[in-house]
Amino acid sequence: MNRLDHRDPLVFDTHELGRRPGSLRKVSRTLEAPGGFGIIDVIGVPENSEIRLDLRLESVVEGVLVTGTAETHVEGECVRCLEPVDFDVDVDFQELYYYPESDERHRARTAGTEDLDEDSEEETYRLEGDFFDLRPVLRDAVVLALPLQPVCQEDCLGLCSECGARLSDDPAHHHDAVDPRWAALQGLSADHGDEARGDVADRRRGIKNSDTREGLAENQEK
């Protein structure tokens, strides 16, 4: 069995609570956030940032019922425009940490249940001596409170697919898109336009040359 590190700020001692059902103890603690409290590459609690905990520890027949709230700050980026996103979150959680002997009885009672969830063993928490580790419970509570697709604002327009400009800064932003199917015709049109301009120029030069020859003929007659 893994031994808990009693120096870990997310490990709590229930010795003063005792095992008499109904005993109650309140604990408040401010600590630095460990890594992994968030959705990877999307949003989460920055490592070493502050987490404020308020816990209510209550002794019950099977173990210690932990009810608490956590306040912290999360940071990430908008999934549409990649701008920074940050805000405060408050989460609530509750978990029963079984006494070792109570946990064994619980397992014995549920061992023959056909519809028992395969992950039930992982979802069951127990005390190690008088200590319990709040880390997995707190991490799950924080992650479930985070948006899977955070946005800087509900109506964020995202980025321009052509140049990457943030569209919310300039809603009228656009590019004159040309259908690639017409690109070849545009080229032909340009070529025909050049030919037509050339023909006009040639006709003008022909008219000018004709006028010049007539003028020379008149001068010779005179």
Image (cartoon, rainbow, N blue to C red):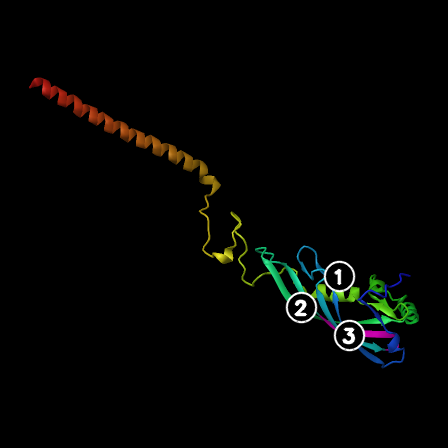
Between 170 and 113, which is closer to the camera in this rendering?
170
Which residue is denoted by mark 2 in the rendering? 89
97 relative to 180 in the view: left or right = right
Q: In terms of sequence position, does the residue under pointer 2 or pointer 1 come before the other?
A: 1
Residue at (16% x, 21% y) in the render: 213
For this view, does 218 lie left or right of residue 54?
Answer: left
Q: Quadrant of residue 205?
A: top left
Q: Are marks 2 and 1 in contact (CB under 8 Å)?
A: no
Q: Which mark is residue 115?
A: none
**SS for tag 1?**
loop
Q: Residues within 10 Å of mark 2 (few under 14, many from 20)?
A: some
Tell me the residue that label 1 is attached to. 34
Query: Spatial distance from mark 2 to mark 1, Cα to Cα?
Result: 16 Å
The disc labelled 2 sits on which kind of residue?
Answer: Val
| Residue 14, percent from left and from top | 86, 74
- Specify the amino acid type for callout 1: Pro
Q: Position of residue 103 (x, y in %)?
A: 90, 69
Q: Amino acid at mark 3?
A: Thr
> Which segment is the magenta one?
60-70
> Crowdedness of circle 3 by 10 Å Cα count: few (<14), some, many (20+)?
some
Q: CA distance from mark 3 to mark 1?
A: 20 Å
Q: Residue at x 41, y 37 (%)?
A: 186
Q: Which mark is residue 67?
A: 3
- What is the secondary structure assignment of the residue under circle 2? strand
Query: How far apart are the alpha carbons under marks 2 and 3?
Result: 17 Å
Q: Is residue 64 magenta?
A: yes
